[in-house]
Amino acid sequence: MNEPPKSLGQAISDVLEALFGYIRAEIRHFGEGLARAVRRRGLGVLLLAAALLPILAAIIFVLLAIYQALTLALPPWLASLVMAILALALAAVLVAAGLRRLGGDPDVR
């Protein structure tokens, strides 16, 4: 039962076949781990996304309450103007913070 020695080409072929088999197994293992993580966290992400609608409704009602409170002391057009200016100021602050983060400044966290 003595097998003849393999040629260099056959040995290289065997090594490459083993290497590709190992790479396929690692990719399959990574995919299975990723699928488990998505299934485990998927419901959490879905619940957070579903919470956005009630949060948006609450923000709208708070803004309406502020507007109505302002109309007690100011004419409606001025109360609307004040609300618009406050909303634009908040948006400007958020945009500036976002741009600072996107700029890659390592000191900003």
Image (tube, grey):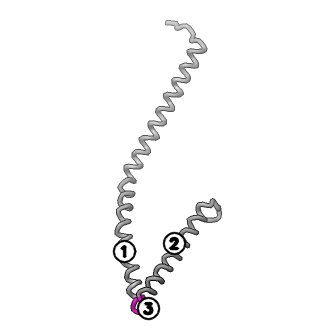
Give yes or no for contact between labels 2 and 3 (Cβ–Cβ under 8 Å): no
Q: Give the labeled residue for mark 2.
A: 91
Q: Nearer the viewer, residue 3 or 70?
A: 70
Circle 2 packing at 10 Å, graded few (<14), some (14-19), many (20+), is: few
The answer to which image quadrant residue 5 occupies is: top right
Mark drawn on residue 101: none
Please report whichever mark, 3 or 1, sits nearer to the chain's N-terminal start. 1
Q: Amino acid at mark 1?
A: Ala
Residue 87 percent across, percent down from the top left: 48, 76
Mark 1 lies on a secondary structure that is: helix
Read off the magenta span.
70-75
Please report whichever mark, 2 or 1, sits nearer to the chain's N-terminal start. 1
Q: Nearer the viewer, mark 3 or mark 1?
A: 3
Circle 3 packing at 10 Å, graded few (<14), some (14-19), many (20+), is: some
Mark 2 lies on a secondary structure that is: helix
| Residue, far front | 77
Q: Nearer the viewer, residue 58 or 9?
A: 58
Q: Give the labeled residue for mark 1.
A: 58
Q: Magenta includes 71? A: yes
Q: Nearer the viewer, residue 68 or 27?
A: 68
Give yes or no for contact between labels 3 and 1 (Cβ–Cβ under 8 Å): no
Please report whichever mark, 2 or 3, sits nearer to the chain's N-terminal start. 3
Q: The C terminus lies in which quarter of the figure?
A: bottom right
Give the number of marks.
3
Circle 1 packing at 10 Å, graded few (<14), some (14-19), many (20+), is: few
Q: Give the labeled residue for mark 3.
A: 74
- Residue in the picture at 59% in, 15% down: 9
- Residue in the picture at 38% in, 61% down: 49
Q: Nearer the viewer, residue 62 or 38?
A: 62
Q: CA distance from mark 2 to mark 1?
A: 18 Å
